[in-house]
Image (cartoon, grey):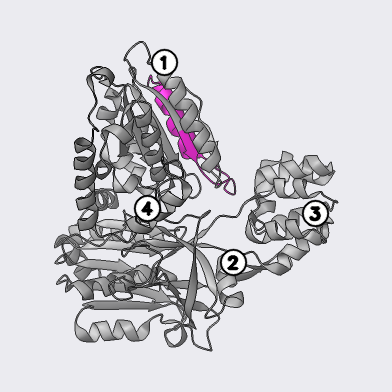
Amino acid sequence: MASLPLLPSSAPFRPEEIAALNGVITKTSPEQRAWLSGFLAGFQAGTGGAQTAATAPQAPAKKVPLLILFATESGNAETLAAQTRKAAQKLGFAAKVSDVADIALADMAKAENVLIIVSTWGEGDPPQRAMDFYNGLLAEDAPRFDKTRFSLLALGDRAYVNFCMTGHIIDERLVALGAKRFAPLVECDVDFAKPAAGWIASTLDVLQKETADEHAVIHVDFARTVPAAAEDDEDAEPLYTRDRPFEAEISELINLNGTGSSAETWHTEISVEGSGLVHVPGDALGIVPVNDPALVEDILSVSGLTGDAAVREALSEAQDITTLTRPQVEAYAKLTDSAALKALAADPNALTAWLQGRQVIDLLEAAPAKLDAATLTGLLRPLPGRLYSIASSAKAAEDEVHLLVSAVRYQTHGRKRSGVASVDIAERRKKGGSLKVYLKANPHFRLPADPSRAVIMIGPGTGVAPFRAFMQEREAIGATGRNWLFFGNRHFTNDFLYQLEWQDWKKSGLLTRIDTAFSRDQREKVYVQNRIWEQRRELYRWMQDGAAIYVCGDANAMAKDVNHALIRVIADQAGIDETAAAAKLDTIRRDGRYLRDVY
């Protein structure tokens, strides 16, 4: 659930009035907001709000229809689609937003004007919910788009080789199917806000000019014609963002692993009292991290900027000093005129291999050079926030958000490395200290609306976090549906996260079944996918009875292995081949009963 909206700074009020109104709005109940909406509408009508004859508008002209599509994994494309619709509506377009998962290609082909916002996931893959759309578009029997003009915004991460690949493939395929690209594709890295805003403004401007002769586009004063209650909640500005976070107190920090474990997994309780943040199970909390001070000093030293306090602050809180990308290597090779780096940048395969396990410090040390502040910070990307699945239900911990944070530490190329946010929490944050946080809603990872529906939860390691929230919620609302957890980690003795809670829920009957896989407790490693196969008969019976399946955790290995295990279960129990089983599992996904939150 999104947090209550703030009035934007562009609202027609003085700054102190905006602050006062925000203070009232964030404390109101739905009933109070509905009452205010009706009161203001009546007040407007009763105090001369109606147009006089002298100022009465002409009959509305036909608006230009505009279809805005998004394909998202983490929600960024969806957020930008909502922003695009707002901007389009202000220009008089009849704008409609749709997830590509919810539109038929044949219906899309009927649209004359289309804007598409597409994320690339992992190593060049489309988002999970976009798979049907993507495969259908590439199919031989895909419809023609001869009447469609479009422009596409591609989101990605330059740290990956196949940067924005999904967007490029969709863009080129639409042209091949007859669509007209009226504005060029724009690529966005993780710092997408500015280029995305530019794309929204420029494409709408071009489209407005192209359609001027086809429809009379009118500018609409929405403050005058649309009551406040008509605005969609999902389009409202969030209370807090990466750039405008809430400073929350850390009320508890507990390492859940035993003393004999090689891991550190921190149960982190964060007070959000007074924030106005409203979350539901499945949502994530964003953390604004601070970079490792030792790494900051190493970068300042090799760059000759040790005495620059402003750069130190920027490297600590604003710049990404760990992720290393191809464009950074190419730019630094040119900057330093390093023959070795130029040769590396010119060989894509060699560069791919060299980038593995390296960070910005490795690039700077490969060709040490004295840099000025602007050159160094210009080489770096903005430091993104880190998202963690919320491990608590607001019904169980009203003014708190619980997280499950695994401290990431490893060594490559002779240097110790650490996770930016995870080790910041594990080593440098203390109980009573603070973290800058914001809410990231996840509407595509929700408990069933029907509390009597059974759920199957598959979450090894920290992937178990949202399922703790699920169980707290189901307990609080008295849900009657059965609950089955598959959990995996290294050792039963030291790594059974939230062990006592799971055992209590099992004893009370809320948790119907729990199957664990502790990979290092026997000679042959055992993982959750092995337990899934072992329990295939009962698991398939639950699936046939309508259970919803949830998977949370590592996308690169675990999620793929679990997906294949589920296909094998269906094939074995239904007596069909794996191709047919995969189609059956895909049907379950389209029905909203197979949901994944993977990273």
Tag 2–tag 1 contact (CB < 8 Å): no
The label nearer to you, 4 versus 1, is 4
Q: Name the residue under label 4.
A: 21
Q: Earlier in the sequence, mark 3 or mark 4?
A: 4
Q: Please give the residue where the numbered disc 3 appears in the rendered image.
A: 366
Q: Earlier in the sequence, mark 4 or mark 2?
A: 4
Q: Distance between the residues labelled 3 and 1?
A: 51 Å
Label 1, residues with CA under 10 Å away: few <14, some 14-19, many ≥20: few
Name which residue lies at 19% across and 82% down: 509
Q: Nearer the viewer, residue 246 or 370?
A: 246
Circle 2 is placed at which residue position? 419
Q: In which quarter of the image is residue 132?
A: top left
Say which quarter of the image contains residue 383: bottom right
* Secondary structure found at label 2: loop
Which is nearer the eye, 94 or 67?
Answer: 94
Residue situated furthest front in the rendering: 47
- Identify the magenta region: 153-182
